[in-house]
Amino acid sequence: MATIGFVGLGNMGIRMARNLVEKGHRVQAFDLNAEALRGAKEFGAAASAQLADVTKGAEFIITMLPTGKESRAVWLSEEGLLKSARAGAVLMDCSTVDVDTARELGKSAKTIGLEMLDAPVSGGTIGAENATLTFMCGGDRATFDKAHLILSAMGKRLVYVGGPGHGQAAKICNNMLAGINTIASAEAMVLGRNLGLDPAILFDVIANSSGSNQALLLACPIPGVVPAAAVNKEFKPGFTGSLMLKDLRLSQLAAQASNTPTTLGAVAAQLFTVLEAVGLGQLDCSAIVKLVTGEIGGSKETKR
Amino acid sequence: MATIGFVGLGNMGIRMARNLVEKGHRVQAFDLNAEALRGAKEFGAAASAQLADVTKGAEFIITMLPTGKESRAVWLSEEGLLKSARAGAVLMDCSTVDVDTARELGKSAKTIGLEMLDAPVSGGTIGAENATLTFMCGGDRATFDKAHLILSAMGKRLVYVGGPGHGQAAKICNNMLAGINTIASAEAMVLGRNLGLDPAILFDVIANSSGSNQALLLACPIPGVVPAAAVNKEFKPGFTGSLMLKDLRLSQLAAQASNTPTTLGAVAAQLFTVLEAVGLGQLDCSAIVKLVTGEIGGSKETKR
Amino acid sequence: MATIGFVGLGNMGIRMARNLVEKGHRVQAFDLNAEALRGAKEFGAAASAQLADVTKGAEFIITMLPTGKESRAVWLSEEGLLKSARAGAVLMDCSTVDVDTARELGKSAKTIGLEMLDAPVSGGTIGAENATLTFMCGGDRATFDKAHLILSAMGKRLVYVGGPGHGQAAKICNNMLAGINTIASAEAMVLGRNLGLDPAILFDVIANSSGSNQALLLACPIPGVVPAAAVNKEFKPGFTGSLMLKDLRLSQLAAQASNTPTTLGAVAAQLFTVLEAVGLGQLDCSAIVKLVTGEIGGSKETKR
Amino acid sequence: MATIGFVGLGNMGIRMARNLVEKGHRVQAFDLNAEALRGAKEFGAAASAQLADVTKGAEFIITMLPTGKESRAVWLSEEGLLKSARAGAVLMDCSTVDVDTARELGKSAKTIGLEMLDAPVSGGTIGAENATLTFMCGGDRATFDKAHLILSAMGKRLVYVGGPGHGQAAKICNNMLAGINTIASAEAMVLGRNLGLDPAILFDVIANSSGSNQALLLACPIPGVVPAAAVNKEFKPGFTGSLMLKDLRLSQLAAQASNTPTTLGAVAAQLFTVLEAVGLGQLDCSAIVKLVTGEIGGSKETKR
C-alpha cells in the first residue's frame, strides 16, 4: 500500500480520494475548503494542515483542481508541491487544464528530476464515485507504468497517450467532439419532432445509421426516449454545461495555438456560452436542447 | 414475381433495378439517358420508350431521381406517372427530396386513390450494389407492408417511420447529424495531430469515449487509421461531398419551414458549400478534412 | 393623376396606399381583412369587393404582401391579377419575396404582354408613413421610368437595379449584411462593456474606425448611447426580428440556389431563429442583443 | 523636444520612429534585428546596443512589438524596461496585445511609481508612414495628456478610452467588428454577383442602405468597384489576413475571459484561420473573398 498526497477535494476529488482510502492506501489530503477536508477525514484520509504537508513521505502526489491557474499555483509556487515532493515521487495532475500548462508542469518536474503525468479524467462524478473513470495519461511510459496501480484504484480505463501534455490534448479533442455531438443531436431530434416524427422512431433510425453518436445514445435530449438521460431528470447533471464550456474553451485555445481551424468547435463553444449567459450552466450539458426549442425564456413579461 | 415500373437509372437506380431483375421481378425501366437505358436492357430489364410506358401492368412503380424538381415532374406532370398508374398500384419515390414535395406527392396520390411511400435510402452505391440499403419509409403502414417484398430485394433494413413525408424527414435528420459528425471528426483528429498526438492512439481514445460517432469510426479522415476509409483511397466516394451538401440543404429548408434553429447544421452546410466552391464536391465527403488542414490550395501561384 | 389598384393593406401597405391617395391618385384597394379595407376607405381609397376589381381601369397595379406564396396566388391564380389587368398596365410587386418567385412573376407578365417590376422596399413603417421608402427595382428600365411618378409618391429613393428579380436580389444582399451587422454590433458593444469600457466612448471609437456600420450608428443596442435606438424604447420596432429573419432566410435560399457560401449569413439566420423561438421575434431586431447578454431567461424558475 | 526610447522596428515601428525623428525628437532605438536598427540610424535615430540603453535619459519610452509575449518580456523581464526606466518617464506600449497583458503591464508600472499607457494603433503601415494613425489609449488621463505631444507626432487621432487595458479592449472590439464586416461584405457582394447583379450597382445600393459598413466602403472585394481596394492590386496589403486573425483571436480570448458570447466573432476568427491554413494569410484581409468564390484551389491536380 502506498502513501499518497491528494490536493483538491471538490465533487470529483473527494470521491477519488475516498476510493484510494477504500483500496487501503494512506491518503494525506488538503483543500482550502475546511468542510471538504473534514469530509475526507470522515472516510479515513489524513487531513494536512497546509499544502506542503501532503508530500511528507508520499510516493505519489495527485491534484484535482478547477483550472490551469490553480494547477500552476499548487505545483509551481514558492510553497508549491514541486518544492516539497521527495525524490522518486510520482506526480499526477488529474485536473483538466490547458495543454501549455500541462507541458510546463511536466517540464518543470523533469528539470528537478521528478516524474509527472498529466492524467485528466472522463466519466464525471458517477465515474469518480464508482471508480470507473477513464484516465488519459501524458508523460513517460515508465511513469505511467508506476502510476498504474494507483490510477486503477480510481478508474477502469487507463490510456497511455504520449508525452507531456498529451493527456490533456486527447481529452479536449474528445470533449470537443462530445460537445458538438451534444448540440447536433439536440438539433436533429428537435428538427425531427417539429417535422412530425415520433422521437422514439427517429432515435431508432439514427442510432442504426450514419448519424449515430454517443451523445445521442446516452443522453438523447427529448423526454422519454432514453430513460437514463438527464432530460428525464430535470437535467440533473451528469456533466454540466459549464464544464462542457470549459473543455470547449480549452479546445479553442489549443486550436489557436496550433493554427487549426475548428469551426464547429468554435460555434459549439459559443452556444454553450449562451447557455451559461442565460443562467443554465449548472444543468446537465444536454440542456443545450433548450436553445433549440426556445424553452429558455419562460417569463411572459419579457415577451411581447 | 411482380411487374415493376422503374424510373431513374443513375448510379443508384441502375443498381437497384438490377437487384430487382436478379430477384426475378419483371422491371420496366425508363431514363432520359439512352445509354443508361441500354445498360438496364443488358441485365434484363425491359426498356420503355417513354415515361408512361413503365406503368403498363405495373403493380409497383419506383422512382430514383436527383431532386424534388424531377420527382414532381415525373409524378405530377401531364405525362406523369400518377396519370398512367393503374388502380391498386403501389408507388414509391426512393429519391431524396424535400419534405414538402414528399408530402405533396403522397397527398396527390391519395386524392386519386393510389398508395404511395416516400422511401429514401441510405447506404450509397455500395449498398445499392449489394442490396444492403436502408429504406426509411413514410406513408400508410399497409402500403409499407405491401411494398416490403419489393424493397427487401434492394435493401436490408426497412424502417417504417410514419406518415407521408416522414421517410424524407427521418433521412435528413440523420444525414444532418452525419454531415456535422464528418466535419467535427475532421476537426478533432487534425487538432489532435497538430498538438502532437499519434492519430491512431487518439482515434482509439475517442472511439471508446463520449466523442465517438459513426463518421469517425467508419471514415476517420487521417491517413492510415481506418484502412477502409476514403482518405486512404484518394477520397474515392462513398458518399460525395456534393450529396452531403444536398442533404444538408434539405435539412435547412425543413428547419426554415419548421422554425427550428439548427446552428451547427447551418454551418455544416456552409462548409460543404465551400468544399463545392473550391471544386472538390465530387470527392468523398470526408474530404472536408482538407478545409481543416488547408490542403485545398496547393498551387504556389495563388500564394504570396 | 393615375388610377391605381392596390392589394395588401398590412402595416406597410396601408401607409403606402394612403400616401398615394394624398398625392391625388385614385386608389382601388383590396385586402382579405375587412377592417383593413375599412381603414383604407376612411382616407379616401375605393374599396374593391374582390381581388379582380382593383384592376378595373387601373394604369398601375401594386401589391404589398407577406411572402412569395401570397404573391404567386394574387398574381398567378385563376382569379389573379394577371388575368384581369388591362393591356398597358404597369405592375409592381413591392412585397419582399424570393428571387425565383420575382423572376417567375416578371416572366409570366411579359408572356402576356404586360410590364412588371419587382420593387421591394426598405425603410420600415416609418418610411412608409413618411413616404421616404427606398425602392429597389428589377425589370425593364422603360417600366421603371413609367413607374417613377407613382413610386415617388411613396418613397424618396428609387433605384433601378437591373432585370426581373434583381430588385429582390439587391434587397436581400443588403439585408443579409444588415442582419449580420446588427448581431456583430451587439457582440462588440456587449464585449466592450463586459471588459469595463464606457459604452458611449466605445461607440465613439468604433463609429470613427474600421468597425463602423449602419446597424451600430442607428441602433446601438446598449441603453443610452444612441437616443433614437429601439433599445431605449423597450425594443419597440422599427424592423422586427421576425422580418429580419424572413429576409435572412430569403438570402439563404438565394445562396443555396446560386451555390454561394455565406457562412456569416447562415449563422445570423440561425441566431434570429433562436430569438424567434424564445418568443421575442416581435421586438425590434436589435433585441438580438438579449442573446449576447443572456437577458432572455429571466424567470428564476427555469434556472437552477 | 523630448528624448524617447523606442523598441520594436518592424513594419510599423520603423515608420513611427522615423516620424518622431522628423518632428525633431531624439530617438534611442533598439531591435534584435540588426538590419532594422541600421535602417533607424539612417534616418537619424540613435541605435542602442542593448535593450536597457534606450531608457537612458528617456522621458518617454515606446514599444511596438508583435504579441503580448514580447511585450511581457521587454517590459517585465530581469533586463526589462521597467527596471531601467528613470523616475517620471512616461511609458507607452503601442503593440496590440491581450487585455490581461495590458492590465498587468499598467499595474506593474504603477507599483514602482511609473506611468504607463496601453496605446494600440489602427491605420496600418500607411497610417504609420503618414503619421495618421489612430491611438486608443488606456491608463490615467494625466498620463494621456503628457503623452499627447509625442503621440501626435505619429498619429492624427488620439482617443482616451479609460483605465489600464482599455485601449486594447477598444481596439479588439472595433477590429472584431471590422473582421466580421470584411467577411460579410464579401458574402453579400459575391451573392449579389452570383444572382446576376451588377456589382457596382449593388455596391451603390448597399452603401446607401442599412447594410453599409466601412469594410465595404473602403475595400469592396469585387474587382473594379472601389478603385483603391486591395482586390484591384492583387490583394497587396493594407492590413493582412494574418493580422486580422491575430486581432480576432484576441477578441475571442477577451470574450472567454468575460463570458461574452460572440458567435459571429468566433466564426469570423475560424474563417480567417482557414485563410491562413491555405497559405493566403499574407494577402490583404479582403482576400477572404476567395473563400466565398472558391478561388483558393486552383491547381487542377487536387480536383477530381
Image (cartoon, coloured by chain):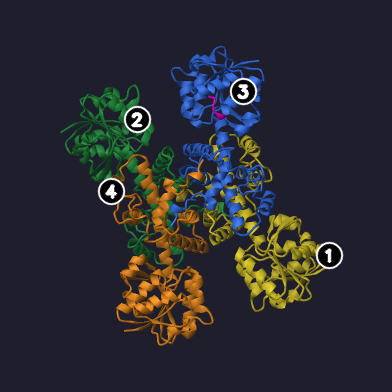
Chain colours: A orange, B green, C blue, D yellow
Q: Circles 3 and 2: CB distance less than 8 Å?
A: no
Q: CA distance from mark 3 to mark 1?
A: 68 Å
Residues C9 and B4: in front is C9
What residue is pinned by disc 1? D24
What residue is pinned by disc 2? B104
Q: Secondary structure at mark 1?
A: loop
Relative placement, left or right, of D293 versus A118 is right
Q: Secondary structure at mark 3?
A: helix
What is the crowding at mark 3: few (fewer than 14 residues within 10 Å), some, or many (at least 20)?
many
Q: Which chain does the residue under circle 2 lie in? A: B
Q: What residue span does the magenta drawing correspond to?
A: C7-11
Marks 3/1 same chain: no
Q: Is residue C10 magenta?
A: yes
Relative image position of residue A262 (x, y in whole percent): 47, 56
| Relative to D172, residue C150 above or below | above
Residue type, numbered disc 4: Asp
Q: Is residue B81 visible?
A: no
Relative image position of residue B74 (x, y in whole percent): 33, 28
Residue type, numbered disc 2: Glu
Residue type, numbered disc 3: Arg
